[in-house]
Amino acid sequence: MLTASLALAQTKVSPDLQVAVDLSSAASKSSFMQFIASEAGISTDPSVNVIVQYAAAPNQTNYSTATSAGATLTGQFTSFQGATYSVPLSAVGQLVSSDSGISYISLDRPLAGAVDYGDGAQAISLDIARNQGFDGSGIGVAVIDSGITSNNDLRFVNSTNSRIVYSQNFVPGTSSTSDAYGHGTHVAGILGGNGYNSTCSNCAITFRGVAPNVKLINLRVLDQNGQGSDSSVIAAIDRAIALKSTYNIRVINLSIGRGVYESYKQDPLCQAVEKAWKAGIVVVVAAGNLGRDNSFGNQGYGTVTAPGNDPYVITVGAMKTMFTDTGADDQITTYSSKGPSAVDHIVKPDIVAPGNGRVSTLASTAATLCANNPSTAVPKNYYQTGASSSASSTYYSLSGTSMATPEVSGAVALMLQKSSTLTPDQVKARLMKTASKNFPAYTSYTDPATQVSYLEQYDIFTVGAGYLNVAAALSNTDKASTTVGSAQSPTAVYSSSSGTVTLANQGSSVIWGGSVVWGNSVVWGTNALSGNSVVWGNSVVWGNSVVWGNSANAQSVIWGSSVLWGTTITTNGDK
């Protein structure tokens, strides 16, 4: 017989919140723990911030019911069917049982930017797009990040007016929308910098973004340390949806992530990005920087972070350009998180883009990332002939899937500038179909600092549908179904008896079938769909088990049934 606590955990309470409730309950029953807590001035029944999802949009009756159950309302949303509360751990069960309209309750979890401390225009064929005159004009992109500090690179072309057309802060305790961390401004520069500060008579390199004339909607959710919460991000997404018509917001860039704790169908962050997608906004999300995590013998597989685990969104992994002008020698970064996603086993990432050593706009030399990591500084003579070797005050370098994500967001802006009627699903399908698929079978890299070697296999869970190709995406005229959700990423289904994995389409996904235009071999290519351990029907889709597959422990981690597995994922990079 299930206990009341366990019954709740399996239905409406997230696993991490249930653990907190159980621990608090145990502590409250222990006289010794009560004594220790009293001496330390700590409550054995602390209040926690939670996000409550409802089956329908909550109203005053729902709020009053929650208050009567011991919760305090702390935040409301417009498009998201939920609210935030502060509630004592002992009252969580009462809160859930008091209102049948509650569908799920979870902790308001912390998250961070997907950055790893440490000009791929030709690698992604961006130079061709520039020559065709596409620059993102008229398209609004919401950058939900650590804020954007205005600078010359973020002005409109041939104007002194800033392209940051709207700013709002969602970080508690401050009203500033500037970037005190240094992450959001860097992301904005990759997405839409115009290169003003690196355009001069002695400038050998111009650091120009993918869509240098987009409108930027600055929604700050990360503080000066790069930390934020689910509720802040959901509120920012809510605001982006509300402002969609005002600023023609067609894209949301989320270079952030956190661990996976439950199915995307229950995760409030995933549900929020789906709301934006269904409202007609393309959501582009970082895959995460946990590709080096081998804690469970899984070689970085199964480490994609939320909300990149949601099948609707475009999830982006990171490539390294090898600092050459051609994309032929580019390789996957060892830190880029791999699929399938925890819990649901969604095939991720969807696409990869340049993310290593990206030079972009600097918010301020006092911004935390730059101040604490002086190695990120770019010397002036790096891009100015005859200049000194002193650090630039306008540009610096970062690496991570955070940096790859705005490359794709910028490409989406160019596609929508050219074809404004494209739906989010059509954009995703076209990007995946046209992605470059010419990868080696394997590459290896040895970290000079740790002497640890990494063998990377270019399979569907590592590179997705391939390498971003902006020119190909712009020239393609194929149109997938207009059905919302038609391009949802498929699910990988593992058979323990045969040791193989098949791919199953999501309920409303209709474009990854066997048609000539959107057939699986066209979308994912023959390299990613090769080997002998994973099959789609009668076709093999994943490589052999050289990199992953031999370890029973790894299999139990990735294909196991425990929804608590996701709690082992952290938000920080590992390089």
Image (cartoon, helix red, strand yellow):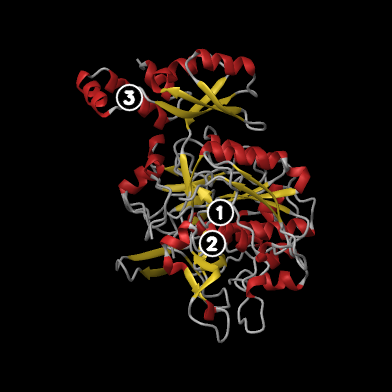
Q: Quadrant of residue 559?
A: top left
Q: For the residue marked with disc 1, what is the amino acid?
A: Asp
Question: Which residue is tagged 2?
Answer: 364
Q: Is residue 238 above or below residue 397?
A: above
Q: Residues within 10 Å of mark 3 (few under 14, many from 20)?
A: some
Report the quarter where the N terminus lies: top left
Dot 1 and dot 2 residues touching (CB under 8 Å): yes
* Residue at 42% across, 67% down: 374
Foreground: 562 or 504?
562
Question: Which residue is tagged 3?
Answer: 43
* Residue at 46% across, 54% down: 338
Q: Is residue 135 above or below residue 484?
A: below
- Where is residue 165 shown, x and y percent of the image? 72, 52
- Where is residue 261 shown, x and y percent of the image? 44, 37
Question: Which residue is tagged 1?
Answer: 179
SS category of the residue bearing label 1: loop
Q: For the residue marked with disc 3, what is the amino acid?
A: Ser
Report the quarter where the C terminus lies: bottom left
Q: Residues within 10 Å of mark 2 (few under 14, many from 20)?
A: many
Sequence order check: which comes first, mark 2 or mark 3? 3
Sequence order check: which comes first, mark 3 or mark 1? 3
Residue 415 in view: yes
